[in-house]
Image (spheres, helix red, strand yellow):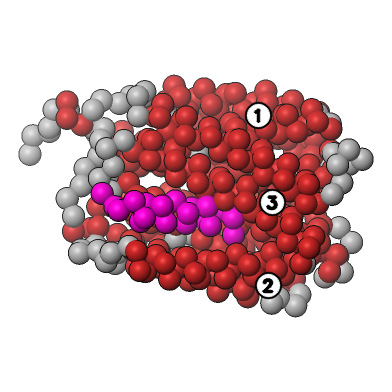
């Protein structure tokens, strides 16, 4: 087990990961005005590089995590994101900002295939660990909303990148001092899955987790990147102050983050398939209601939407913890993330054009259809039996 300070820093790193990726979405309206764009939707596609690399970068990050070491990769994570955010703060035009954001995504790609397997090493209750870690990650989304809103209003959008960048560098120094060096890379350790499946069922589970992660990622990316502008549009005339809107959105994320703790505890007690299926199906009516809601009714529907979107997040990490040996978890996670996030990153590129052409009401209905696709995919998960009770195949 890791010392408590190391566990704390790994959870803080998850918050940093999501916070860094969403600064641009929260500040895009002000940046667009500064760069001479008539509408925020026209600048939004310049942020897609961050999310493409957030997916594609997971593959080499996971491989290096298993073969080189997870601690070393987490050091690269902190310092890489810190420098990249400072470069974003110095950008003089949309293409320079796009390049800096792409770097942010490249280093942010390290966390999920490396930091989460590092946190799960030897965990007796992986579901609970994943739930708390998910809470930390989504509190990072909440911090991004409120901190970016406040910094944009009081110090300008460049400060919204610079302040977190400096904080990341400081966290990197602390991580080097607190977390001990690994004695050997994960690939050389003894590990084991917690649920026994045949090779065919493991392959099927990996396909399911990849497809479900892609559809869930589309939901996550379109909502978290679009929520600041959705809230601004639907609360127009009721609440127009950017800092207050940031606080309201942060409140949604903070409350919704608790869903991951609840789901994480349920994962330790029950089979994955019925739990995941229930959460995915509930997303459909809530997204449909949000598509038509205005004012404070929209705020309530948005809260319900994010509770269910965040509540679905722990399942893919739980699948890896249950079905995959620790010696190769970073590589499997990296492969899964490279495919699923590579697909779902297209949602960020499409967000501005889709909202401009269809409006938020049609986009939210489209997301309800995506949630149905997730539910259908989850039906293909294999049935589980504990590894200790499994009959070992003859050699």
Determine whether, in the image, residue 153 is placed left or right of residue 85: right
Residue 64 appears in the figure? no
Q: Which residue is mark 1?
A: 304
Tell me which residue sits at (43%, 71%) in the image.
Answer: 173
Look at the image and tell me in which quarter the C terminus lies. top left
Front-most of 182 and 279?
182
Front-most of 158 and 370?
158
Under circle 3, the secondary element is: helix
In this picture, which residue range is highlighted in magenta? 1-20
Q: Which residue is mark 2?
A: 89
As drawn, 135 above or below 156: above
Q: Which residue is mark 3?
A: 146
Residue 362 appears in the figure? yes
Tell which circle, 1 or 2, labels the residue nearer the N-terminal end: 2
Under circle 1, the secondary element is: helix
| Residue sitting farthest toward the left | 395
Tell me which residue sits at (78%, 47%) in the image.
Answer: 244
As drawn, 374 above or below 143: above
Determine whether, in the image, residue 123 is placed left or right of residue 342: left
In this rendering, which labeled residue sits more in front, label 3 or label 2?
Answer: 3
Could you tell me how many numbered marks the image carries?
3
Determine whether, in the image, residue 261 is placed left or right of residue 63: right
Percent x, y of residue 81: 53, 67
């Amino acid at each position: 087990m890791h010392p408590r300070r190391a566990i704390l820093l790994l959870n803080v790193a998850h918050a940093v990961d999501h916070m860094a990726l969403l600064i641009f979405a929260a500040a895009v309206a002000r940046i667009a005005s500064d760069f001479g764009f008539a509408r925020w939707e026209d600048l939004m596609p310049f942020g897609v590089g961050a999310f493409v690399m957030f997916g594609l970068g997971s593959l080499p990050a996971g491989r290096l995590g298993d073969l080189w070491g997870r601690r070393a990769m987490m050091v690269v994570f902190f310092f890489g994101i810190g420098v990249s955010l400072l470069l974003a703060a110095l950008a003089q035009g949309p293409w320079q900002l796009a390049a800096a954001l792409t770097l942010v995504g490249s280093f942010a790609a390290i966390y999920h295939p490396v930091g989460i397997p590092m946190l799960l090493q030897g965990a007796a209750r992986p579901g609970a660990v994943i739930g708390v870690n998910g809470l930390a990650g989504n509190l990072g989304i909440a911090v991004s909303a409120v901190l970016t809103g406040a910094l944009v209003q009081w110090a300008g959008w460049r400060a919204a990148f610079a302040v977190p960048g400096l904080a990341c560098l400081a966290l990197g120094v602390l991580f080097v001092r607190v977390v001990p060096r690994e004695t050997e890379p994960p690939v050389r350790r003894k590990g084991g899955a917690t649920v026994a499946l045949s090779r065919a069922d493991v392959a099927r589970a990996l396909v399911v987790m990849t497809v479900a992660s892609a559809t869930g990622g589309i939901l996550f990316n379109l909502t978290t990147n679009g929520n600041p502008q959705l809230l601004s549009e639907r609360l127009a005339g009721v609440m127009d102050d950017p800092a207050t809107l940031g606080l309201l959105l942060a409140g949604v994320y903070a409350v919704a983050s608790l869903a991951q703790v609840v789901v994480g505890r349920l994962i330790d007690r029950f089979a994955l398939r019925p739990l995941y299926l229930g959460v995915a199906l509930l997303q459909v009516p809530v997204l449909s209601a949000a598509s038509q809601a205005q004012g404070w009714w929209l705020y309530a529907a948005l809260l319900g939407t994010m509770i269910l979107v965040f509540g679905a997040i722990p399942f893919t990490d739980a699948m890896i913890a249950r079905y995959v040996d620790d010696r190769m978890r970073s590589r499997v996670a990296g492969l899964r993330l490279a495919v699923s996030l590579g697909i779902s990153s297209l949602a960020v590129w499409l967000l501005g054009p889709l909202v401009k052409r269809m409006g938020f009401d049609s986009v939210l209905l489209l997301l309800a259809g995506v949630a149905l696709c997730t539910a259908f995919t989850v039906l293909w998960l294999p049935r589980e039996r504990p590894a200790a009770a499994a009959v070992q195949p003859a050699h």
